[in-house]
Image (cartoon, rainbow, N blue to C red):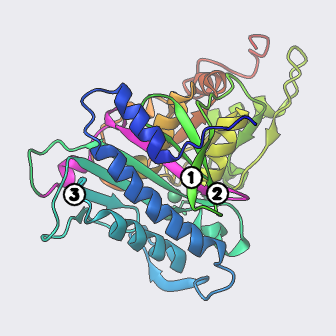
C-alpha cells in the first residue's frame, strides 16, 4: 500500500519556510488563520441556497455595486479571522473604502493583507463558481498601526498571493514566489490537501475569455485581436474557443490549467476597465507569472504598476505567455490581421 503523503497547506508552508532561512514561521500562522476564514466562507457558500443569505442587502459598496449578503459575510469573516493573530499591521478589502486597522487591543505584525472577499458575486444566486482572492505584502512603515502607504505597493513586492475557488470542489491556489500550488478541500476532515503541486500554465492555449457584450465599446486593436483569434489559421489551425464565466477566479483558474488568455480590456466607457489592481489584478498576475505565464495592462507588466489609489482599476490581459505577447502586439499596433503567417 503506497501511502500518499498527506500535505496540508500548513505543512507545505512550513516545509517551504525551511527552504527559506530567516522565515519566522509568522507566515504559516497567517496562512492558517486565512484558511480558517476560507473554510467558514465555504460552509456558508455550500449551503447558500438553504438559508436566507441570498439576495441583496439593499446596500451598495464603494463602487456603487449592489452588495450581496455573501459578500458582506465573507468580508467580515476574513477581517475577524485576521484581526487578532498579530501577523498584520493593516488590511484592505474591496468592500471597504478605507484601509482596515487592527483593533487597538490586538498586536500588530509585519504583513499587509489585501483581499476580495467574494469574487463573482453576480453569479452567487445562479450557483455559478465564485471565489475569494488575497494578496500579501511586507509592511513598509516601521512599526505599530499600518497605513495606506503599506497597502499601496507595486505588485512585484507581493510576498504571497492566492485565491479560493468555490466550485465543483473547493480549491485554494497560492504562491509565495516559489511556484504555484493547489490544495483541494477535503470536507470530511476540513483540510486543504495538496492536489496540484507546481502548476505550470501552457505556453499557448486555444481558449480566449472576454465579455463580448462590451464589443461596441472596445477600442479597435482589441476588436482586431479577437477577430484574429476567431479566424481559423490554416497554418496552425488554431480556432480558439470562447469561455467566459464572469467570475475572475473561475476564468483565471481555467486559464491557469488549460492555457489561453483572459481579458478585461479598458474601453471607450471605462478606459481603465472594471477589475481592481490591488486585489484582483496584482494577485492574479503574481500567480500566473509564477506558473510561467504573463499579465499585462496592454502596455506594461501589471506587477510593475505603481498604485496611487486603493481601489484603482486596470485593464487586464493575462494567461499563456505566447497568447498575451501576441495580444500586446495587436494592442501596441505592432501586429495587424494581415500578419497572419507569423503564427
Ligand atoms: P466582484 O464580484 O468581486 O465585484 O468581481 C466581479 C468581477 C470579476 O469577478 C469578473 O471577472 C468581472 O467582474 C465580470 O465582469 P462583467 O460582468 O462586466 O463581465
Ligand atoms: Mn472580484
Ligand atoms: Mn468581490
- Distance in Å between CA atoms under marks 1 and 2: 6 Å
**Badge 3 is on which residue?**
86
Quarter holding residue 164: bottom right
Region of the chain picked out in magenta, as a range:
145-169
Residue 201, given in percent of the width and then of the height, sits at 64, 29
**Badge 1 is on which residue?**
192
Of badges 2 and 3, the one in the foreground is: 2
* Residue at the image point whose x is 19% and y is 52% from the top: 109
* Pick the front one: 37 or 284: 37
- Whether the residue carrying mark 3 lies under 8 Å from ligand 3 is answered with no
Side of 313 relative to 129 (left or right): left
* Residue at the image point whose x is 53% and y is 54% from the top: 269
Quadrant where the C terminus sits is: top right
Q: Residues within 10 Å of mark 2 (few under 14, many from 20)?
A: few
- Distance in Å between CA atoms under marks 2 and 3: 28 Å
In primary-sequence order, the first of circles 2 and 3 is: 3
Quadrant where the N terminus sits is: top right
Q: What numbered label is drawn on residue 186?
A: 2
Q: Residues within 10 Å of mark 1 (few under 14, many from 20)?
A: many
Amino acid at each position: 500500500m503506497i501511502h500518499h503523503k498527506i500535505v496540508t497547506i500548513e505543512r507545505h508552508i512550513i516545509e517551504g519556510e525551511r527552504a527559506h532561512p530567516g522565515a519566522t514561521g509568522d507566515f504559516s500562522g497567517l496562512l492558517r488563520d486565512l484558511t480558517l476564514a476560507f473554510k467558514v466562507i465555504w460552509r456558508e457558500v455550500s449551503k447558500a441556497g438553504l438559508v436566507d443569505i441570498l439576495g441583496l442587502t439593499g446596500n451598495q459598496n464603494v463602487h456603487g455595486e449592489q452588495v450581496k449578503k455573501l459578500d458582506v459575510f465573507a468580508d467580515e469573516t476574513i477581517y475577524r479571522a485576521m484581526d487578532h493573530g498579530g501577523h498584520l499591521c493593516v488590511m484592505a478589502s474591496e468592500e471597504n473604502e478605507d484601509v482596515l486597522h487592527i483593533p487597538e487591543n490586538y498586536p500588530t505584525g509585519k504583513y499587509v493583507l489585501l483581499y476580495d472577499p467574494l469574487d463573482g458575486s453576480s453569479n452567487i444566486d445562479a450557483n455559478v463558481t465564485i471565489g475569494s482572492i488575497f494578496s500579501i505584502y511586507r509592511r513598509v512603515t516601521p512599526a505599530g498601526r499600518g497605513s495606506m502607504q503599506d497597502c499601496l505597493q507595486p505588485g512585484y513586492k507581493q510576498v504571497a498571493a492566492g485565491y479560493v475557488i468555490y466550485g465543483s470542489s473547493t480549491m485554494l491556489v497560492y504562491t509565495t514566489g516559489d511556484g504555484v500550488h493547489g490544495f483541494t478541500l477535503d470536507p470530511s476532515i476540513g483540510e486543504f490537501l495538496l492536489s496540484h503541486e507546481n502548476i505550470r500554465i501552457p505556453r499557448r492555449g486555444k481558449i480566449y475569455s472576454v465579455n463580448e457584450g462590451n464589443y461596441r465599446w472596445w477600442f479597435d486593436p482589441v476588436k482586431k485581436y479577437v477577430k484574429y483569434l476567431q479566424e481559423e489559421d490554416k497554418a496552425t489551425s488554431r480556432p480558439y474557443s470562447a469561455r467566459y464565466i464572469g467570475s475572475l477566479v473561475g476564468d483565471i483558474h481555467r486559464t491557469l490549467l488549460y492555457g489561453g488568455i483572459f481579458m478585461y480590456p479598458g474601453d471607450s466607457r471605462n478606459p481603465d476597465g472594471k477589475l481592481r489592481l490591488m486585489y484582483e489584478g496584482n494577485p492574479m498576475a503574481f500567480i500566473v507569472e509564477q506558473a510561467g505565464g504573463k499579465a499585462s495592462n496592454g502596455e506594461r507588466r501589471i506587477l510593475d504598476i505603481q498604485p496611487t489609489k486603493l481601489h484603482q482599476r486596470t485593464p487586464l490581459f493575462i494567461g499563456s505567455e505566447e497568447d498575451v505577447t501576441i495580444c500586446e502586439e495587436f494592442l501596441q499596433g505592432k501586429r495587424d490581421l494581415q500578419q497572419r503567417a507569423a503564427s
